Every structure is written in structure tokens, then in C-alpha cells.
Amino acid sequence: MAQKIVIDPITRIEGHLKVEVEIENGKVVNAKASGTMARGIETLLKGKDPRDATYVTERVCGVCAGSHGWVSSVAVENAQGAKLPQTARVLRNLILGAMWLHDHPLHFYHLSALDYLDVTMVAYYQGQDPKLLAVKDKIVKLVKAGDTSPLLPRYKPDEFSVNDPDLVTTAVSHYLMALEMQAKAKKMSAIFSGKQPHQSSIVAGGVTMLPDLSKIEQFRSLLAEQSDYVEKVYWQDVLTFGAGPLLPLARAGVGGGHGHYLTYGGFPLDDKGKFLFPAGVIFDNQFGNVLPVDPAQISEAVKYSWYSEQTGSKNPSEGETIFDLNKPEAYSFVKAPRYNGKPMEVGPLARMLVLKPQPFMDLVTRYGIKPGAVARHAARAYETVLLAKAMPAWLDELEDLIKHGETRIHDTEHWDPPATGEGSGLIDAPRGALGHWIQISGHKIANYQMVVPTTWNHSPRDEHDQPGPLEQALIGVPVPDPENPVNVVRVVRSYDPCLACAIHIIQPESNRILEFQIG
């Protein structure tokens, strides 16, 4: 008989997520992912000025807020018929590029790495590196003072946990270093966007600020530091873990999923559809057959979501947000988006499998890495390296545009919203394919819909009972000890749902809250 485990909510992510798994013979045989918080921002936007959508939708998330503002602005621009100036395009890439440099290392070090580290091994470090000795001293003092958060408590170490004192102490030192680098990455973005989080420069039609050369040089100096850190610390740590202690997980493809991938493309390089990370669709792990994206193939099912049945099976351009909290089979506030009827994984792994950069693919081949939790970390880290390498050229492009008089940063002819119109913005955020759809009537928002990356990755079942990507990825995940389901959260966090606060697991027979180390 299957044993049920409920993890509600998952910690170290953004938002409220409940995961139920059923375990037989030490493996997950069934899974449900439940978004337990209603967003409601689409409903709030009705009747508002379309230009407000940029700033309202940014409040969906404080981690990747700029992405929502960017995509929302594109949706309004398409409804207006606005043409984005070149200088504004480059500035948007730089503002959001800096936020990606902030976001990806944060996910690895502060949200996921603790799932793989036996942090207590820091106390056994015997090396002579002064920086690592300082880390050891700091952690030991915190343990003695009973103040080990956020490093402890966590799930109990298992067979895949890293327990080498030198490696663990180095990883913890990089955890601390990443905090400093995040602050610097946010500062980079704020140079061109006014502030972070929730930037104040990107607006429908362009941006509001043209930087002078001193600001560009300030950005360039911080970028050089980020690039060095991303390539020499972050990427190397992911390689060390993925090709070392986590290689069995990588080769087994733990957390693999359906094998369908979608990306809208990331960082437009011109106004003709060229992206740093190109758009594409892959079905059934057929990596050599990348298909173009057709937005008309997107629909959202609601059979198991707390929304009225009349909202189901629609393209988001015609979607509705009508709650139905009494649906007997529903278990999530997340709808179930599908592309051509299939559940699609979105995010860094999708982007790298569409782009197929040779060093990344060589790494996958050399170590026999299959799509899964470890591969997602590797893809996220490698695309960060690619982004950091691309950004200096964008600064050069910005300087060149300014020197040649291309100082127009907004399509002022389309400053005001149209009486009627509809449009969409489809660009990848750090976590994957992000889409906003808008309908305008009487100069106001008549309807607004968002399909965000976690909607794709953490969707419930659809009307054909197809599990969402995370639900499918959890099938087969080893859980040898039901009271230490660390592999479950490893897979969940590999998608980067972002940040939350607390966790508890209920013992299904007695409804007793089990007490053991959690992470």
C-alpha cells in the first residue's frame, strides 16, 4: 500500500506550494503539485490604465520583478502599435541581464545547495586556508550560540549529500560570497533602472532614462566583477558537484519529466526576432528537432484548478480569471497550460536544449547527464556564463548608439494608450517562458492574463489527466526514508520556484506533524 507524504508549504521558494507524493517500494509513484495562493492581479487590472500594468504586474514577484514589467510593456506596445527604439532595447537587456546575474546564483547557493550539503562537516575542516578557517570559526560559533539559521535545520544527510569537510567549507564560503555578489548585481540593474527590486525605468514604449558615460562605466566595472565570479566560482561549483558527488543523480536523470520543452526566447538582439537565447519547442526529448513557437497552440486547462469550467481550454488571449472554490476535484490555484495539448517544461534547461551551446552539450555527453534536477542546475549556471559574456557587447552597443546620436529612448507617438487594441508579450524570464496578454477597450484594460514560468512547470493535471511537468518529474524519484524526503524537494527546487518561509509534513494516518530536520 502506498504511503502518502504531504509537504506544505515547500520552503526556500517564492510563494505557497504544497506537494503530495505517494511512495511504494522506496519510490514516488504518484504526485500532486498544489499552488495554494490565488494571484488575482489579472482581476485587479481590469478597468485600469494599460500603462499601469507594467508596475502592477511587477508586484507579482520581488525576485524577478523586472521581467514582468518588461513583458507587460511589450504587451501594451503590441496593442498600441509602438516601435521600440534601439537604445531602449539595449537598456532593457542590460537592466534585466543584471537581474538574471543576481537571480541564478541566488537559486543555486541559497535555495538549492543546502539540499546537497552536510553543513555540519564545516566543523571538521582541517585545512589552513585563512578564509575557510574564518568560515569554520563563524559556523562553529553560531552552532554554540544555537543560531544556525538559515544553514540549519535541514533535511538529514543522505547518500547523495556532500560530506567532505574541505568541499563543504568551500561551498559555505561561496554561499556567503554569493550574498555580496547579489547585492552588486542589483546595484548594476539599479544604475539604469532607478531602483531594484521593482525597477522604475521600463515603461510601455521604451525606457525613461538615458545614462551618461560615467554610469555606463560604473555598470561595466561591476559587470567585470560579476563575469569573473560567474565563470570562476558559480560555474565551477556546479561542475564540481554535478560531475562529482551528484553524478549518480545526473546519470539517472532523477527528476526528468515528460521531455517536452518550450522557450519564447530571451534577450532580443534586434527587432526582427533574433535572441541571445532563441525561441523553440522540443517534444519527446528529440533535441535535434527544434520547432518554431506558435502562440496559438497555447491553451489552459482548469479541470483540477479552482477556476470556473467556462475558463478552460482557452488561449490566454481569450482567457478569464473566474474563481470557483467549490470544484470537487480541484486542488490548485495554478491553471494547467499546455502547448499543442502537451505539458511543457520551461526554464534554463529548455533554453540550453534549444540553443545547444557546444561546451554545454559536450559536458552532457562526456558525463552521460540526462535531463533532470542536476541538468537544470548545470543549464542555469552555463547560461549565466553565456549571458555575462554577452553583456559587455551590449554596453559597447549602447555607447556607440549614444555617440551616433541615437538618444531616443521612447516611442513618444504612442505615449497614450489606444481606444481599443490587444497584444501580447512573450519573453523568457529567469525561470522560463513568461507571457502577458492584454485587451484594451475605451482606453482601459478590458482583460489581462498572465502565464508565468511556474504555471507551466508546476501545473496540475489537465482534462486528459496528464500530470504537470513537476508532477511527472517526481514519478520514480527515490525516497528510501519517508521521514526524510530530501529527494522530493531537490527536484521541486531544481525548477527554481524561488522563496517561501516554512514547512511541515503531516503523518497521514494520525495527522501528526512529524518532527525531524527539514530544509
Image (spheres, rainbow, N blue to C red):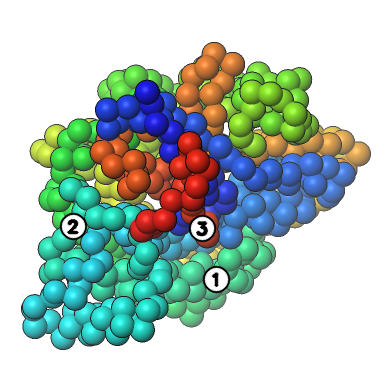
Label disc, if present, on residue 498 of the rendered structure: none
Crowding around mark 1 (Cα neighbors within 10 Å: few <14, some 14 to 19, many 20+) is many
Residue 195 percent location from the top left of the image: 60, 71
Q: In the rendered picture of this protein, how many numbered marks are placed on residues? A: 3
Looking at the rendered structure, the kind of residue marked 1 is Ala
Q: What element carries label 1?
A: helix
Tell me which label, 3 or 2, sits earlier in the chain: 2
Q: Nearer the viewer, residue 291 or 404?
A: 291
Tell me the residue at 31%/78% (across/down): 143
Q: Can residue 153 be seen in this view?
A: yes
Q: Which of 297 and 495 is in front in this view?
A: 495
Give the labeled residue for mark 1.
Answer: 190
Q: What element carries label 2?
A: loop
Looking at the rendered structure, the kind of residue marked 2 is Val
The residue positioned farthest toward the front in the image shown: 510
Left or right, 223 with respect to 80, comes to left
Looking at the rendered structure, the kind of residue marked 3 is Ala
Tell me the residue at 68%/45% (across/down): 39
Of badges 1 and 3, nearer the viewer stands 3
Give the labeled residue for mark 2.
Answer: 162
Give the labeled residue for mark 3.
Answer: 502
Crowding around mark 2 (Cα neighbors within 10 Å: few <14, some 14 to 19, many 20+) is many
Marks 3/2: CA–CA distance: 24 Å
Position of the N terminus by quadrant: top left
Crowding around mark 3 (Cα neighbors within 10 Å: few <14, some 14 to 19, many 20+) is some
Residue 434 percent location from the top left of the image: 55, 41
Tell me which label, 1 or 3, sits earlier in the chain: 1
Q: Would you identify the image quadrant in which residue 229 lies? A: bottom left
